Image (cartoon, helix red, strand yellow):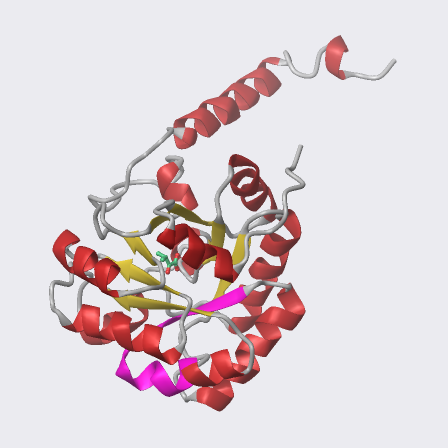
């Protein structure tokens, strides 16, 4: 059963921060996982460009296209009733400036029904955020470690510079309604969180943020191999699914499935 509660809104997130209520954010990329996250009470579902890595099997987030992000965001929005749904603008879809960012974000809101967009933000994106917000498009900004800049960064590293706090404050000034802080020291996250009126959502940013986001496949234990230090596995779904699949193979091969219980007269 899905919940029939009203959908979380952008202004409610700022109220949650003021009232000290933690905001729960999870990624989802398809109908069934979005439905599960929504039923479980996640406040915000991010259709992250991490789907390039998690779902498509690429090494970085760079290859995922606008059309692919729209395809996934639409199915996630359709699966949810309560969670606010944020579509992630993929690499190359907004870096040219406000006009390009408005064109692509309008497509996200119109074609997928999502409630807001996210973009990786630095000083060059301020004009873009202002233009989007001016056009009525809520923006979640993403600072700290920015995976779309991996070719310039060279490696995924924890960010400890105070520039992160400045980037977050600038994005708030430009009109962003919340800020993702990715892979920053707990101290930097604490500072940013205390200086902003809008909520900070941490991933690998310690306990002081107003909310947390994790990749769905990571926290349910579906991801193969090593995950970063900040990922807590709340289940081992990968083993469960592998065991169920092995049992299915076994029963088919032994002729044990389907028996009369699973056959028509
Ligand atoms: O793409 C994504 O999933 C993200 C989160 C890690 C914040 O940007």
Residue at 33% from the left image edge and 64% from the top image edge: 197
Question: Please, is residue 55 above or below residue 42 in the view?
Answer: below
Q: Position of residue 215 (x, y in %)?
A: 38, 48
Ligand 1 - quadrant of the structure image: bottom left
Residue at 38% from the left image edge and 59% from the top image edge: 58
Q: Quadrant of residue 14?
A: bottom left
Most foreground residue, 197 or 172: 197
> Is residue 118 part of the magenta span, yes or no?
yes
> Is residue 259 part of the magenta span, yes or no?
no
Q: Quadrant of residue 74?
A: bottom right
Q: Quadrant of the C terminus?
A: top right
Q: Position of residue 214 (x, y in %)?
A: 36, 47
Answer yes or no: is residue 121 visible.
Answer: no
Q: Position of residue 225 (x, y in %)?
A: 28, 40
Question: Please, is residue 181 above or below residue 172 in the view?
Answer: above
Region rendered in magenta? 116-129
Q: Which residue in the rendered view is the most extreme toward the front? A: 19
Q: Quadrant of the N terminus?
A: top right
103 on left or right of 221? right
Answer yes or no: is residue 220 visible.
Answer: yes
């Amino acid at each position: 059963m899905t919940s029939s509660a009203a959908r979380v809104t952008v202004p409610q997130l700022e109220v949650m921060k003021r009232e000290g209520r933690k905001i729960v954010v999870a990624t989802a990329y398809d109908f069934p996982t979005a439905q599960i996250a929504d039923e479980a009470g996640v406040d915000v579902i991010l259709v992250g460009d991490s789907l390039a890595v998690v779902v498509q099997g690429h090494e970085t987030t760079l290859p995922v296209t606008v059309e692919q992000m729209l395809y996934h965001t639409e199915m996630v929005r359709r699966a949810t009733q309560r969670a606010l749904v944020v579509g992630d603008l993929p690499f190359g879809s907004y870096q040219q400036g406000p006009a390009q960012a408005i064109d692509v974000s309008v497509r996200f809101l119109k074609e997928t029904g999502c409630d807001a967009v996210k973009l990786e933000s630095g000083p060059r994106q301020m004009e873009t955020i202002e233009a989007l917000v001016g056009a009525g498009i809520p923006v979640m900004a993403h600072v700290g470690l920015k995976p779309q800049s991996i070719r310039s960064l060279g490696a995924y590293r924890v960010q400890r510079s105070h520039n992160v706090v400045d980037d977050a404050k600038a994005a708030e000034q430009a009109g962003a309604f919340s800020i993702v802080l990715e892979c920053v020291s707990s101290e930097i996250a604490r500072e940013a969180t205390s200086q902003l009126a809008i909520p900070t959502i941490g991933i690998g940013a310690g306990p002081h943020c107003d909310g947390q986001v994790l990749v769905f496949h990571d926290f349910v234990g579906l991801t193969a191999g090593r995950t970063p230090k900040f990922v807590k596995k709340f289940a081992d779904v990968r083993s469960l699914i592998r065991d169920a699949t092995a049992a299915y193979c076994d029963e088919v091969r032994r002729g044990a499935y389907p028996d009369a219980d699973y056959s028509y007269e």
